[in-house]
Image (cartoon, rainbow, N blue to C red):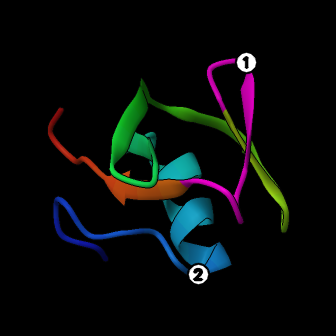
Amino acid sequence: MLQQGEPLTLHRHFQYHLQYAIPVEVYRGDVHVDIGLLTAVDANFAELQGTLYNRSLFTFVSRPGF
Protein backbone atom coordinates (compact mmCIF):
# COMPACT_ATOMS: atom_id res chain seq x y z
CA MET A 1 0.00 0.00 0.00
CA LEU A 2 2.33 2.79 1.21
CA GLN A 3 6.10 2.69 1.11
CA GLN A 4 8.23 3.41 4.17
CA GLY A 5 8.33 7.12 4.88
CA GLU A 6 5.09 8.00 3.07
CA PRO A 7 2.47 9.97 5.03
CA LEU A 8 -0.90 8.45 5.82
CA THR A 9 -3.41 10.82 4.24
CA LEU A 10 -6.55 8.79 3.62
CA HIS A 11 -8.74 7.01 6.17
CA ARG A 12 -8.09 3.72 4.38
CA HIS A 13 -4.33 4.21 4.98
CA PHE A 14 -5.00 4.38 8.72
CA GLN A 15 -7.36 1.38 8.56
CA TYR A 16 -4.75 -0.67 6.66
CA HIS A 17 -2.02 0.12 9.19
CA LEU A 18 -4.36 -0.70 12.06
CA GLN A 19 -5.56 -3.97 10.50
CA TYR A 20 -2.09 -5.27 9.61
CA ALA A 21 -0.24 -3.86 12.65
CA ILE A 22 2.14 -1.74 10.57
CA PRO A 23 4.04 0.79 12.69
CA VAL A 24 3.65 4.53 12.17
CA GLU A 25 5.69 7.54 13.22
CA VAL A 26 3.92 10.64 14.52
CA TYR A 27 5.19 14.17 13.84
CA ARG A 28 4.04 17.61 14.93
CA GLY A 29 5.46 19.80 12.21
CA ASP A 30 9.07 18.63 11.84
CA VAL A 31 9.29 17.30 15.40
CA HIS A 32 9.15 13.54 15.96
CA VAL A 33 6.61 12.78 18.71
CA ASP A 34 6.03 9.01 18.82
CA ILE A 35 6.40 5.70 16.98
CA GLY A 36 4.43 2.50 17.35
CA LEU A 37 1.26 0.66 16.41
CA LEU A 38 -2.17 2.17 15.93
CA THR A 39 -4.68 0.78 18.41
CA ALA A 40 -7.78 2.69 17.17
CA VAL A 41 -8.69 5.22 14.51
CA ASP A 42 -11.67 7.33 13.45
CA ALA A 43 -12.18 10.32 11.15
CA ASN A 44 -10.65 12.79 13.65
CA PHE A 45 -8.27 10.90 15.92
CA ALA A 46 -5.71 8.12 15.81
CA GLU A 47 -4.79 6.23 18.97
CA LEU A 48 -1.23 5.03 19.22
CA GLN A 49 -0.72 2.66 22.14
CA GLY A 50 -3.12 4.53 24.43
CA THR A 51 -2.36 8.11 23.34
CA LEU A 52 -4.86 10.00 21.17
CA TYR A 53 -3.55 12.21 18.38
CA ASN A 54 -5.69 14.65 16.42
CA ARG A 55 -5.31 13.73 12.77
CA SER A 56 -5.49 17.37 11.68
CA LEU A 57 -2.66 18.48 14.02
CA PHE A 58 -0.21 15.61 13.56
CA THR A 59 1.39 13.89 10.57
CA PHE A 60 1.49 10.09 10.50
CA VAL A 61 4.20 8.34 8.48
CA SER A 62 4.31 4.67 7.47
CA ARG A 63 7.17 2.67 9.05
CA PRO A 64 6.87 -0.95 7.85
CA GLY A 65 9.67 -3.14 9.11
CA PHE A 66 10.39 -0.97 12.16
Q: Position of residue 54 (x, y in %)?
A: 76, 51
Within the image, what quadrant is residue 10 found in?
A: bottom right
Q: Nearer the viewer, residue 21 or 14?
A: 14
Residue at image point 33% right, 51% down = 30
**Residue carrying label 1:** 50
- Distance, label 2 to label 1, CA atoms, is 22 Å
Q: Position of residue 15 (x, y in %)?
A: 62, 62
Is 30 positioned to the left or the right of 15 in the image?
left
Q: Nearer the viewer, residue 35 or 40?
A: 35
Q: Is residue 41 visible?
A: yes
- The part of the chain drawn in magenta is 48-58
Residue at image point 25% right, 47% down = 63
The type of residue carrying mark 1 is Gly
The answer to whether residue 31 is magenta is: no
The C terminus - image quarter: top left
Q: Position of residue 44 (x, y in %)?
A: 84, 62
Is 30 positioned to the left or the right of 65 in the image?
right
Within the image, what quadrant is residue 11 found in?
A: bottom right
In the rendered view, tell whether residue 34 sits above or below residue 12. Answer: above
Bin the neighbour count of mark 1 within 10 Å (Cα to Cα): few under 14, some 14-19, many 20 and up: few
The N terminus - image quarter: bottom left
The disc at residue 18 is none
**Residue carrying label 2:** 10
